[in-house]
Image (cartoon, rainbow, N blue to C red):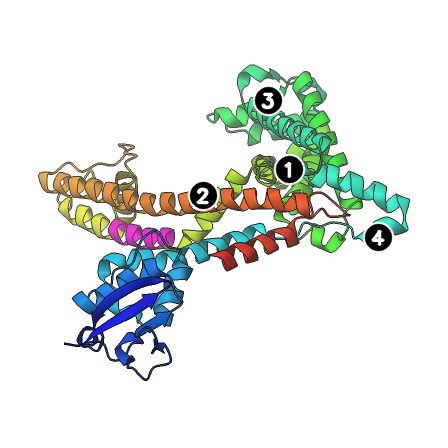
Amino acid sequence: MERVVLNVGGRVFETTFDTLHSKPDTRLGKLSRDSKEFCKETEQFFFDRNPDFFNSVLDFYRTGELHLPIFYCGATLRHELSFWELHEENLSACCLQVYYKFDNDKDTLKTLETYLSVKDLDYTDAQCGASAFVRVKRAIWLFLDQPNSSFLAQMFSFLYFFVVVVSIFIFLFGSHPSFRADIDLSQYDNVTLFYLMSEIDWENPKERLTYLTEVYSPLVYIEWSCLFFFTVELVLHFLTSPNKNRFFGSWLNVLDTFLVAAMLTVLGMEINIQAVTSSTAGGIIYLLLKSAIICRLFRLFRLVRQYSALKILSITLRSSLKELLLLLVVFFMSVTIFAGFVYYAEFEEPTTFPDLFVAVWWAIITMTTVGYGDQYPKTLLGRAVGICCAMCGILLLSMPIAVVASNFSDLHLRNKDRERFLAKDKKKTKSSVSPISKGKLTETMCEKETSVI
């Protein structure tokens, strides 16, 4: 049994040719004294490679199992395996997670790069240098659009958030009787008053509240102030935008435009509410626009630009879309199955589940553990189906939680590393245009981090 001495990075390993030749399709399996790595003076084979990793390589020839050290980066593992001509098929199942963690990390970085490395809309150096007016426009633009551009911009962002919250509460207060007063019916002529009274469903308290009462004046003035604030902000935001076409490429800007237009229209209708309520079409349009104003809640998404955790939450939902869609498919399959089961289990009971659509409603409410109690099985067999339906719902809804939580954890940790890198790199590379023009900087960071890994 001929022994062979291997010098790997200055560390000497000793084995036999028989051991190495057991894997003839690898680099060590092809070794002979005629190989270029053989040194005749020392009677050793020299390889300028990592000696710590070589322990795992040599154990593969001895035991036939290839295990990887967990303390190495995935890129290093791949380079070493490639050099020693060891294939992925040789990996032991217990080490697959270590090996493919590199791919998962790259995918996470790519996801962050895709959603976070978008260059902010801004003026160029040439535009700012050519005109003082452009520099003023840019200062206003950054103040309104980029909360992280300055301390004043952050304060305006908080003010915007406060006005949004006030506007939402005013909207909510307007639907409560405690914040409304009876209207003066004498302002209507007899024809309009007769039409109004005939159109109201007196059994519906919401219609009586809407048509026969009005919001207190202080709340109306606050609502008008909020509307004025949003209108001025939108106009300035649009006029100072570096690119008017890209301005409406943001769904938040489109939403703001729609909300301002809807609120102005509703304000005009409420000023002349008699004419609006004198026709069915006018009343329907008024109610539709009034209900659409609740979309002002989406203005809170502007905070996403200021708080990275909200960005990560949004990216997590996007990256988990496949799992969530799979959940919906399985959920509705289960709903249909249990709806059919409970319908026929209760077939002899005349007071429950008149059709399958009602059974579907019951299955959805039961699987989501809401349990309104408006529909429920009364027979023994139906209750057995209900138990199975509820248990199945609990299991189905709990499964994607681990996936979403894992994705959020990975993205959050990677983003923290990214922000640290970005903060250090920003000190070295400062833009002459803006301290927050970080699109290219983020791309550079991702490229560097990927190359390091």
Per the image, the residue denoted by label 2 is 413
Provide the secondary structure element on which disc 3 rests: helix
Q: Tag 1: residue type?
A: Ser
Q: Would you say residue 104 sits in the magenta stretch?
A: no
Q: In the rendered view, would you say 197 is above or below 9? A: above
Secondary structure category for the residue under label 2: helix
Badge nearest the viewer, 3 or 2: 2
Residue position for label 4:
127
Residue 278 percent coordinates (x, y): 66, 34
User: Crowding near pointer 4: few (<14 within 10 Å), some, many (20+)?
Assistant: some
What is the secondary structure assignment of the residue under circle 1? Answer: loop
N-term-proximal mark, 4 vs 2:
4
* Residue 279: mark: 1
C-alpha separation, residue under disc 1 versus residue under disc 3:
16 Å
Q: Residue at x 64, y 33 (%)?
A: 277
- Which segment did they paint magenta? 323-335
